[in-house]
Image: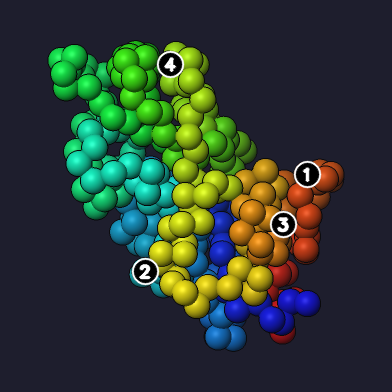
Amino acid sequence: MTRDIDTVLCDLDGVVWLAHEAIPGSVDAIRSLRDSGRRVLFVTNNSAAVVADHERALAAIGIEAAGDVVSSSMAAAFLVQPGERCLVTGGAGITEALEARGADVVLNDGTTRWAPDDAFDAVVVGLHRDFDYARLRVAGKAVLEGARLIGTNGDTTYPTPTGLEPGGGSIVAAVASVGGVSATIAGKPERAMVDVIADKVGASFDPSRAAVVGDRPETDGLFAERIGARFVLVESGVTRPTDVVTEVAVAHRVADLAAFSSLLH
């Protein structure tokens, strides 16, 4: 059954757009889903951008998204406590979310110094296009000295119109290798992202009446499985039509978001 779906948790990269270029049919699909009375949330593992930038980028392709974006940066903030001192190796989206949480934020510019009695409680790592050896050294040192390592997401790549590019997970892996630890991941498919969505939607959210639409079985699909929602796999991003998927249950496998929207009418 698809008509009983009342909430759509929609990935962005590979589903709505590729590097902010709308995938054909996606804008009309979102409009159709909303016109049918369904709630649409944009649930992204992209941690680099602040919420307003996500909203502006969606508005630029014709999708109103104010209050409807959930990012892995928000999920990472759920893993720290107000007042904790956090070293951020990532984009402005992480800083925004941590400051909203009440954390003490220090940006990793590759030259950070600190006294032994002024150590970090956590190192929060995500996609960071200025990442380099100096920043790796600082982040790794903080972890070696006892800071928790939090990764916004584990995606090692993300899709663009010209192919796959390195994702936040590749940077998280580099810091983890220096620190000799396993990172706690915040974004899909982990629990912290579930907590953020529940906080935003409220008590009315019923996962059994929700669909997670995404292009990665190992993140979007597992996320759907863990919250008890249906997984809709689209072939407009990382997963290609010839790829065999066995790791998670797929309720519907379609070419793109437009094809999923048509199933609901």
> What secondary structure is found at the residue carrying circle 3?
strand
Which is more N-terminal, label 4 or label 2? 2
- Disc 3 residue crowd, few under 14, some 14–19, many 20+, Cα 10 Å: many
The quarter of the picture where residue 244 lies is top right
Tell me the amino acid under the disc marked 1. Glu
**Looking at the image, which residue is at 45% across and 71% down?**
201
Name the residue that disc number 2 marks.
Answer: 67
Which is more N-terminal, label 2 or label 3? 2
The quarter of the picture where residue 92 lies is top left
Give coordinates of residue 207: x percent, y percent.
Answer: 61, 68
Name the residue that disc number 3 marks.
Answer: 233
Name the residue that disc number 4 marks.
Answer: 179
Tell me the amino acid under the disc marked 2. Gly
- Disc 2 residue crowd, few under 14, some 14–19, many 20+, Cα 10 Å: few
Of the residues tagged 2 and 4, which is closer to the observer?
4
Q: Quadrant of the N terminus?
A: bottom right
Cα separation between marks 3 and 2: 25 Å
Task: Confirm or deny contact between disc 1 and disc 4 (CB under 8 A).
Answer: no
Task: Confirm or deny contact between disc 1 and disc 2 (CB under 8 A).
Answer: no
Task: Confirm or deny contact between disc 2 and disc 4 (CB under 8 A).
Answer: no
134 left or right of 99?
A: right
Residue 97 in view of the camera: yes
> What secondary structure is found at the residue carrying circle 2?
loop
Cα separation between marks 3 and 4: 35 Å
The count of marks equals 4
Give coordinates of residue 147: x percent, y percent.
Answer: 33, 24
Name the residue that disc number 1 marks.
Answer: 247
51 left or right of 192?
A: left
Which is more N-terminal, label 2 or label 1? 2
Tell me the amino acid under the disc marked 4. Gly
Which is more N-terminal, label 4 or label 1? 4
